[in-house]
Amino acid sequence: MELFSEIKNRYFQLMFRIINECAGGKTKNEIMKIIDEGEFEQKVIGKNQESFADLVLNKCEADENFNLLTERNGVYYPSVGNSYCPEGSTRDTAKKEDLLPLPVRFSMIEKAWLKSLLDKEGIRMVLSKETIDKLQEELQEIDTPIRDEYFELTNTIKLPAIPNRETYEENFRILLNAIIQEKAIRYNNIDKKGNKYSDRLALPVSIEYSMRDDRFRVSMYLLDENRPIMANIFTLSDIRIVEEEISIDRETAKRLLFEQKYSEEPIVLEVTDKKAAMERCFMCFSGMERTARSLGNNKYEIRLNYYLFEEENLIRNIISLGPYVKVISPQRIADEVISRVKKAISLYNV
Amino acid sequence: MFSDFIKHYNIIRDILRDCFLYGCFSRDGLESKRNVSSRKVSYEMRRIQQYVEDKYIRTDKDGRFKLLNLTYDYMRHSDNFLVSTYMTKSFTRADLLTYFFILLYIQSQNRPCCLSEIEDGLAEGGHLSFDRISSKTIERKLSEMCKSFGILSCNVVKRTKYYSIAPDILKSLDNKELRELFTAVGLFKNIVFPVVAGYFCEQTLKDYMYFERNINGIDNHYFNYRHVHYHPAIEEQVLWEILKAIHTRHKVKIFYRLPKGSDLLKQDPSNACEQQNSKALIPYKIRYDVRHGRFYLVSFSKNESCVISRLDRIESVEILEETFKREDYDELYGKQMCYSWSSVPLEGKSEPEKVKLEVIIDEETEGYIIEKILNESPNGVLDKIEDGRYHITIEVNDSGELIPWIRGYAGYVKVLESKELADKIFNDWKEMLLAYGVVQ
């Protein structure tokens, strides 16, 4: 199967949804609402200027209409099958008695991907053994081309092995459950410097995965100190979900993290596009909000918005890009780059 | 049927890359950069604006020029917005109608059906006009729905093919297990390549939960990702073709564009936009540079030389009939790529280069620098000379691959070996200071 396939076209998917939603009958307005939500903002128009909605609702010429739906007393139903439901019944009641008009099944490529997922080391932290066993049995005939042996990741960071894998996995599960249930946790922790913290109260906000070091960390809002923090999952201990009332929800905690930690002033870079400097620069900073403009003469200006906790990494990345990338502002960052480069030169002069 | 869609994903790959990675070109700027007509550029730009969600598109003004820019923030946006560009393949009216009518009919019968039953059933109901859609078309679609899409199964009884809905692989999972699976897919959809397939999987699962199990209002935004680039999704159509070839042990021919500055281009600049065809290659492995988000294909030619191709430069892949034995190349791959930091093979050298670095730190407060350097250098060997002074020896195919990394440790690292590398880095430092107007 092709990755780029018409059955994954947004309008194919929309048609699929409409037909199944119509199992219990839908009015024109209800269908129009589904179409409005699902189609492109700039609606597609057919060769003879028909809209998708007109084709679905059979409002065009007889031989142009899709006729996948049929209208009875102002209500539309799938035109094939026994899923016609009397007026007043709903999709839910219809479904219990009849087959869904269109079955939902994974495509070949999705099954191949799913099968490869079951081989991932971290999968056992999310799926129970029973679920994995059941899926493995169902997918045993699938011959997936997505295999770890065909890939090699480079420019990664190899951190020392996690000392107690079982505790780490258990911690991961508790934190994920706390996030799903939007509950606070209490925990103990030992930070990088060996400082111990006991019985801390925090709201886990999200689990962060880093592809460079293949580690999961947890982003939390520390309720004891009203500030966002990031913690290694394996250093936490005695984590338990608590029923204590807390003054903040996940969305607010996320917003505070974005607001408090986002730089007020962007870093402005001038890039001279030599030795693919521009491409390397854009790739390095691809996950950051940014704008760019051409300055002419093979020079470009990039403005990067960044999180304050990323500043050190950002400075290192800027320096690593070499002489064709220069910090224009803020002056503080430019000074830091200059100072490091001077120090680098001084090492050669010793 | 709708002109807004495209037949080949390749049509939008370049413009997506340019808008996403650069974002600083106006229509005129892009036109001259890519050497294509203004009409084509504006047509493609309009498509991108249609395919990608508004919140990821930023339009800026540069004088009279309008700039289109695709941008996101890894903390706020955990969904790869480029995946939606894969939901744009064009289809014909016959594609749409045959697909849905066949599915509706077989599902309504709730039993295996042969071609003539399906045809008769649909004709009797007046659903398909056989003046416009032939029996052959339906047969082809049935075959595609079995073999390629996988939504139907086919059994042959006395030389007649019977089609039924493919088995439901989720039927043995209860609702709690389905939710678990949904969370797992949500987490790994950005991690397991091709990520586009992961996103498709998540959508199908969501539909399954909603339509087949009546589970509503599920959310999957529990995760965010660091060092997970979104732009490599643009190359996943090519990646998928290569993976199929690697897996089935078929040789490939690749059609690619020459990089800027290549010798062939220097000889003849008019080659810039032309495709070059490779000879038959043995596709062995995909290397993914996590730092930059770039895929490389490592392949071998007939004479066993190692050929590295960036996937963003591959236009298309032809899978050949000729096969190979993968195990024949295991040793060769190890030899060629074992000391490569990213994509440079050993090729032509008898052994890798040795790079020796001196790291100067404040022993009390900067010990983490040594830890970081070691974690980041795959085969680095550490020697403590004295407190605050360490030597690290690294073997690498091409020391040029280390330069950006070494630069990142400015002020801590001095290159001891090789002299060429030390000079190169020292000159870079001087050039950098000059760029800031600092004269030493």
Image (cartoon, rainbow, N blue to C red):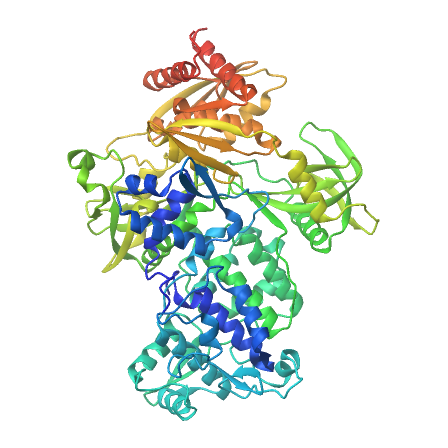
Q: Is A115 on the left or on the right of A245, as rendered?
A: left
Image mark count:
0
Farthest residue, direction right: A244
Q: Please say if A63 is above or below A51.
A: below
Question: Which one is in front, A250 or A78?
Answer: A78
Instruction: Give the percent coordinates (x, y) of residue A63.
Output: 37, 82
**Residue at 71% over, 48% down:** A250
Farthest residue, direction front: B64
Question: Which one is in front, B309 or A102?
Answer: A102
Question: Which one is in front, A50 or B135?
Answer: A50
Instruction: Give the percent coordinates (x, y) of residue B35.
Output: 26, 43
Instruction: Give the percent coordinates (x, y) of residue B65.
Output: 39, 39
**Residue at 40% over, 34% down:** A280
For the N terminus of chain A, the quadrant is: bottom left
Q: Please say if B223 is above or below A64.
A: above
Decide if residue B341 is in sight here. no
Q: Is B162 on the left or on the right of A18, as rendered?
A: left
**Residue at 37% over, 43% down:** B18
Decide if residue A156 is in sight here. yes
Q: Which image quadrant is residue B296 in?
A: top left
Q: Please say if B239 is above or below B383.
A: below
Question: Which one is in front, B16 or A192?
Answer: B16
Farthest residue, direction left: B267
Instruction: Give the percent coordinates (x, y) of residue B218.
Output: 64, 62
